[in-house]
Amino acid sequence: MNILNRALNIYYSEGLIGITLRIKQRLTDKNNFKNWKKKLFMNSDREFEYSEYGIKFKKNKSDATYKMYLKATYGYYYWNRISRLKHNFTFLDIGANQGLYTICAAKNPNSMNIYAFEPVAETYAYLNKNVQLNKVADKCTLINKAIANRRGAAQIAIVDGHSGAATIAEENAIFQRARATTAIELIDAGVLDNIVSAEFIPVVVKVDVEGHEPAVIEQLLKTSFSDRITEIFFEVQERWIDVEALKSTLRDNGFVNFTELGKGGVQYDILATRSS
């Protein structure tokens, strides 16, 4: 029954693409058995655990996002996409949380620079530790700030036991119901230009900021490196994001293809690219 429930959850969140990729991953990943042995024999008495993605995470057992990391609940679509990029690229992980995609990108030998943005201090500490555990710190610049349409201080809503639900989007029901907030620092496109060194390298972006995606994307499109952004992978929540308006903005800036992953509810992912 647990297997059936998990399969249904994957279907509803990732669609048939997710189901297919997971089956393929199980059948073809030559490291699968090695990773299983690591998890079985090496997780019990260490400060970290091995995820089904094959990388290490500092133990954070009370956190829902950490548990999703361990079980590869996010699926393999984007993991495989980033792992298999064959050209040099700079990666921006906006809403990096504890570092799943930051580490994934850093392990691709074709990645030149990784910039990971995580504004919540406690989560940022885990991000920093996980980057070190996986020996990719030399490629990674970690920024303990959030991207917004202004600079300065702000409050971010936080949820006990779920680091991935933190948000500064006031439209988000989580923000409206939040019992706790914490202070963070905001930066805009001008500051981003001073942080990101993209030169002439293609820029690949992931945005997962719980309803704040439109503001982040707006700032990305104002940067001096915006014309080098080849793709943006972002989460949408139709309850508080106007998806068509966001697509229109991206189209106006040269993004012509939109792949929707896991659509079937109000929350899903979109991969926007300039070309197929």
Image: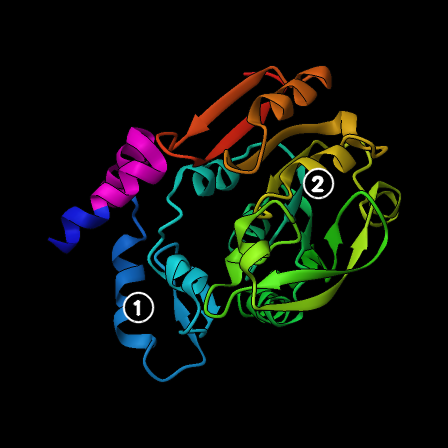
Label 2 amino acid? Val
Dominant SS of magenta comes to helix
Residue lying at 54% horizontally and 70% vertically, measured from the top left = 133
Q: Quadrant of residue 193?
A: top right
Res. 25 visible in picture: no
Spatial separation of the CA atoms under disc 1 and disc 2: 36 Å
Give the residue furthest to the left: 1
Residue lying at 41% horizontally and 37% vertically, measured from the top left = 77
Label 1 amino acid? Lys
Which of 153/33 is in front?
A: 153
Range drawn in magenta: 7-28
Q: Is residue 15 magenta?
A: yes
Q: In this rendering, would 271 be left or right of 114?
A: left
Display colour scheme: rainbow
| Residue that numbered label 2 is attached to | 216
Does residue 36 lie above or below 236 as drawn? below
Q: Is residue 94 magenta?
A: no
Secondary element at image label 1: helix
Give the residue furthest to the bottom: 45
| Residue that numbered label 1 is attached to | 39
Secondary element at image label 2: helix
From the top left corner, tell me how far across and down residue 59 is, in percent: 44, 75
Does residue 233 lie above or below 6 as drawn? above
From the top left corner, tell me how far across and down residue 192 is, in percent: 82, 45
Residue lying at 59% horizontally and 28% vertically, measured from the top left = 242
Q: Quadrant of the C terminus?
A: top right
Residue lying at 58% horizontally and 52% vertically, measured from the top left = 102
**Pointers 1 and 2 in contact (CB under 8 A)?**
no
Does residue 124 lie above or below 247 as drawn? below
